[in-house]
């Protein structure tokens, strides 16, 4: 008897799609003018340091990934 690898196969497909999506975002991130410059993305500049925290961009990416994974996991 062979073990059932159906569940593991789906997990690997989802992981592959997520990795491909992250790669696509990294390639296209410089070409999307508003990404990283949304209202709510904090950028503080001091005399000797600079701090950048993309809060709104992180929330937007999280919502998009949540919806994509929810659609994939739907039965």
Image (cartoon, helix red, strand yellow):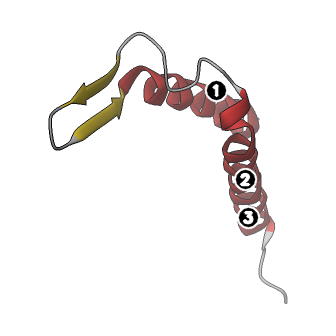
Q: Are marks 2 and 1 in contact (CB under 8 Å)?
A: no
Q: Name the secondary structure under disc 2.
A: helix
Query: Toward the viewer: 65 or 44?
Result: 44
**Above or below 5: residue 32:** above
Residue 53 in the image: state x and y as whole percent: 32, 32
Determine the residue located farthest toward the left in the rendered image: 47
**Above or below 4: residue 37:** above
For image coordinates 49% across by 19% down, the residue present is: 37
Judge the density around disc 1: few (<14), some (14-19), many (≥20) Cα neighbours within 10 Å: few
- Circle 1 sits on which residue? 67
Q: Name the secondary structure under disc 1.
A: helix
For image coordinates 64% across by 26% down, the residue present is: 67
Which mark, by number, is residue 54? none
> So how many labels did they put on this image?
3
- Circle 3 sits on which residue? 12
Q: Are marks 3 and 2 in contact (CB under 8 Å)?
A: yes
């Amino acid at each position: 008897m062979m073990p059932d690898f159906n569940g593991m196969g789906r997990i690997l497909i989802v992981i592959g799609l997520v990795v491909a999506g992250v790669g696509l975002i990294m390639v296209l991130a410089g070409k999307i003018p508003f990404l990283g410059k949304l209202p709510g993305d904090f950028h503080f500049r001091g005399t000797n340091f600079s701090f950048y925290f993309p809060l709104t961009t992180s929330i937007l990416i999280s919502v998009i990934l949540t919806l994509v994974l929810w659609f994939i996991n739907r039965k």
